[in-house]
Image (tube, grey):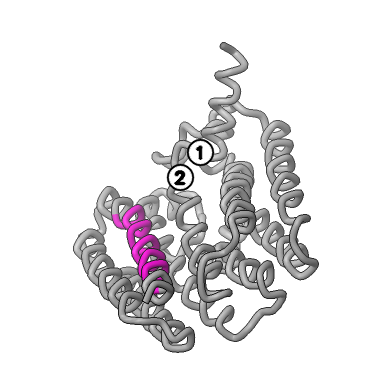
Amino acid sequence: MILMERFNQYGRLMRLNKPIGILLLLWPTLWSLWFAIDGPPSWVILCIFLLGAILMRSAGCVMNDFADRNFDLYVERTKDRPLATGVVSTKEALLLATTLSLCAFLLILNLNRLTIILSGCALFLAISYPFTKRFLAIPQAYLGIAFSFGIPMAFSAQTGELPLIVWLLMMANLLWVIAYDTEYAMVDKIDDLKIGIKTSAITFGRFDIVGIMLCHLIFLTIMVGVGVAQKMGFLYYIGLGISLGLIIYQYSLIYDRNPAHCFKAFLHNNWVGGTIFFGIVLDYFTRTIL
């Protein structure tokens, strides 16, 4: 029973009980896997990237809690996290993050050299991101880069190249991450101001909602450009149109800056990423059968 409780605490530290982060990391990676070869990837590639996303997000969460262990006690939403309460030691956390990172690296060893190099960059970004909240005015931008590295890796793993479309997708995803993670930061804004953590919600000030919606709209505009470049059909654009409707709904949630509503808006981005993905899949599928 003690062993099972230990694993349960490790699972909480990895946020396996809150898979939203895995999904938000996974959606742009899946978009890219389909875009890279104009259709579905092999099952081997797909499984590597699915498992990789789970492992890397889990390692990132462990490092985030390690970096914030002295702050989380003073934030209502995070005060009961395993590291903050001392249920899991810092040594255990570092060992867990190392093990998860090593497992992710072993997966990537099955791919080409360029992808392995990119995975090293992705690991560095994931580990270093939590510490940027001390000095970057918008650490969400750094997180956006970290959460976008599945995009070049998806292309390099299948084609061995990084075409222009990769950078467009990374820019789009960067803006999307800033948008949804600012919604997330609005939940803890009062506590973050007290303890001195920097976030985009604080930096944007009274323009926080304007900043969020502007990032969302530019994100979708770039995705339209990606669709043109990839010669996508109408189903893809229908997906983008539905996503726009979902984002407008998010505005209705965050306009009063209520923390609970802002958190709901953050979670709602899973539907945005999933809608775009299914638009891509359906578009390629219909082209295949017609």
Q: Residue at x 30, y 69 (%)?
A: 243
Instruction: Look at the image and tell me in which quarter the C terminus lies.
Output: bottom left
Q: Nearer the viewer, residue 14 or 85?
A: 14
User: To which quarter of the image does residue 181 belong?
Assistant: bottom left
Q: Nearer the viewer, residue 106 or 261?
A: 106
Q: Residue at x 58, y 78 (%)?
A: 166
Residue 39 locus on image (x, y percent)? 51, 71
In this rendering, is residue 266 above or below 75? below
**Taking the image as drawn, is residue 40 in sight?**
yes
Q: Nearer the viewer, residue 147 or 253?
A: 147
Name the residue beneath numbered marker 2.
Answer: 19
Name the residue beneath numbered marker 1.
Answer: 16
Residues at marks 2 and 1, CA–CA distance in whole angstroms: 6 Å
Query: Is label 1 in a helix, a strand or a loop?
Result: loop
What secondary structure do most residues of the magenta stretch adopt? helix
Is 135 situated left or right of 254 in this image? right
Q: Residue at x 40, y 77 (%)?
A: 287
Residue 158: say if magenta: no
Q: Residues within 10 Å of mark 1 (few under 14, many from 20)?
A: some
Q: Residue furthest top?
A: 1
Which amino acid, by three-letter code, is at mark 2?
Pro
Q: Residue at x 56, y 39 (%)?
A: 14
Residue 159 locus on image (x, y percent)? 67, 75
**Which stretch did the figure color magenta?**
265-283
State yes or no: discs 2 and 1 in contact (Cβ < 8 Å): yes
Is 18 situated left or right of 42 in this image? left
In this rendering, is residue 166 above or below 187? below
Which amino acid, by three-letter code, is at mark 1?
Leu
